[in-house]
């Protein structure tokens, strides 16, 4: 078990055919790897996990998976070449964890978008390895006093990341207070694609969606979704499995208790105003899983919610 101040206590952990290294982010994502010389905190910590099945990089801020490369395959995830790594700032790419609310908090719209957990440090609480050499890391998070002053619902969150030939995320959130707690969340996955114009999404045909580009008006997905402009759509109560068809590659997303599907790409016009996206918007599609909008939860005192998402590719 690894606890306390990871940055001061961990250099490398060794397992059977697996290593976990604590590194500064600018030692992992460099200009030589296609990343700009971004404004980066020199001590911004990430974990580089190398196993017999994959390589992954996870930020301790937000417990955010930034990269997942199964052996012999491409990275499933997109991390912006213009991403900045500053303590307290959101990281553009990978899998941000949006909680305890997703998007704009509709009860308190003045609160920061996508909650408080993605921009704060999580603690690496446990590391284990399965018999098949899948590596499991468990992270935990609790809000600070400032968070609780703005959002007066004490809670704890836990994320287990399982890294084998596929990537698994199991997110648990528990209401630690005495009052019912409103909860929405999303695992905001950015998937790397080779040609945005040719991408197809399987698993949403015939579903109703809320179009955030048209004031959350409700429509039916009766035509194939094309990424020829900004797309920002919320599909409620979908669950099941989706696939991103990217040429000959298929990325599969499935899970349990994360029934909301959100699909987003900013398109050229919006991307031009996003300093950490710019011309690179064609390199990704967000297909997020969570519980939000009509799927939002209310946790009774002491109640917990748990959701699992699995990602793989051919």
Image (cartoon, rainbow, N blue to C red):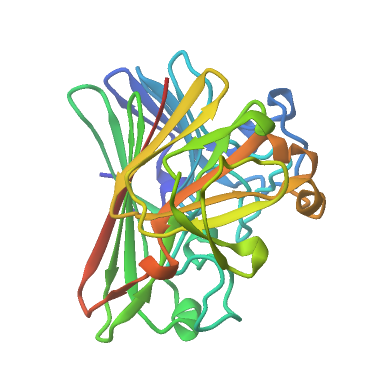
Q: Quadrant of the N terminus?
A: top left
Question: In the displayed structure, does residue 47 sit left or right of residue 258?
Answer: right
The location of residue 300, given as percent across then percent down, is 23, 79
Residue 125 visible at all: no
Q: Observer-nearest residue: 106 or 41?
A: 106
Residue at the far top: name it.
Answer: 72
The answer to whether residue 157 is above or below residue 51 is below
Residue at the far left: name it.
Answer: 131
Residue 183 visible at all: yes
The location of residue 97, given as percent across then percent down, is 46, 55
Quarter residue 18 falls in: top left
The answer to whether residue 76 is above or below residue 154 is above
The location of residue 24, given as percent across then percent down, is 58, 39
Instruction: Write the residue at 55% across / 33% down.
Output: 200
Instruction: Write the residue at 67% across / 40% down.
Output: 80
Instruction: Write the residue at 41% across / 84% down.
Output: 152
Q: Quadrant of the C terminus?
A: top left
The answer to whether residue 298 is above or below residue 54 is below
Quarter residue 135 falls in: top left
Q: Observer-nearest residue: 302 or 262?
A: 262
Q: Observer-nearest residue: 134 or 40?
A: 134
Instruction: Write the residue at 72% across / 27% down.
Output: 34
Question: In the displayed structure, does residue 281 sit left or right of residue 201?
Answer: right
The location of residue 25, given as percent across then percent down, is 60, 39
């Amino acid at each position: 078990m690894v606890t306390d101040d990871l940055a001061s206590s961990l250099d490398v952990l060794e397992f059977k055919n697996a290593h976990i290294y604590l590194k500064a982010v600018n030692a992992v994502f460099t200009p030589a790897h296609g990343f700009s010389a971004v404004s980066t905190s020199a001590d911004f910590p990430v974990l580089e996990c190398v196993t017999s099945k994959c390589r992954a990089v996870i930020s301790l801020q937000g417990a955010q998976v930034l990269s997942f490369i199964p052996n012999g395959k491409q990275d499933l995830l997109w991390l912006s070449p213009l991403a900045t790594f500053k303590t307290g700032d959101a990281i553009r790419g990978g899998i941000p964890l949006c909680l305890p609310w997703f998007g704009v908090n509709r009860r308190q719209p003045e609160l920061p978008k996508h909650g408080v957990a993605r921009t704060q440090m999580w603690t690496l609480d446990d590391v284990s390895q399965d018999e098949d050499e899948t590596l499991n890391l468990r992270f935990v998070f609790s809000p600070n006093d400032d968070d609780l002053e703005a959002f007066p619902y004490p809670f704890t969150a836990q994320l287990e990341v399982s890294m084998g030939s596929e990537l698994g995320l199991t997110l648990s959130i528990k209401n630690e207070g005495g009052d019912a707690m409103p909860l929405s969340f999303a695992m905001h996955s950015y998937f790397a694609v080779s040609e945005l114009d040719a991408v197809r999404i399987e698993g949403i045909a015939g579903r109703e969606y809320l179009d955030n580009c048209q004031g959350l008006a409700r429509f039916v997905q009766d035509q194939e979704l094309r990424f020829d402009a900004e797309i920002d759509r919320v599909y409620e109560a979908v669950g099941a499995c989706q696939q991103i068809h990217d040429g000959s590659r298929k990325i599969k997303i499935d899970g349990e208790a994360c029934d909301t599907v959100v699909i987003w790409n900013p398109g050229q016009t919006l991307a031009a105003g996003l300093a950490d996206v710019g011309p690179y918007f064609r390199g990704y599609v967000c297909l997020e899983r969570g519980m939000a909008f009509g799927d939002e939860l209310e946790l009774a005192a002491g109640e917990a919610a748990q959701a699992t998402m699995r990602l793989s590719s051919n």
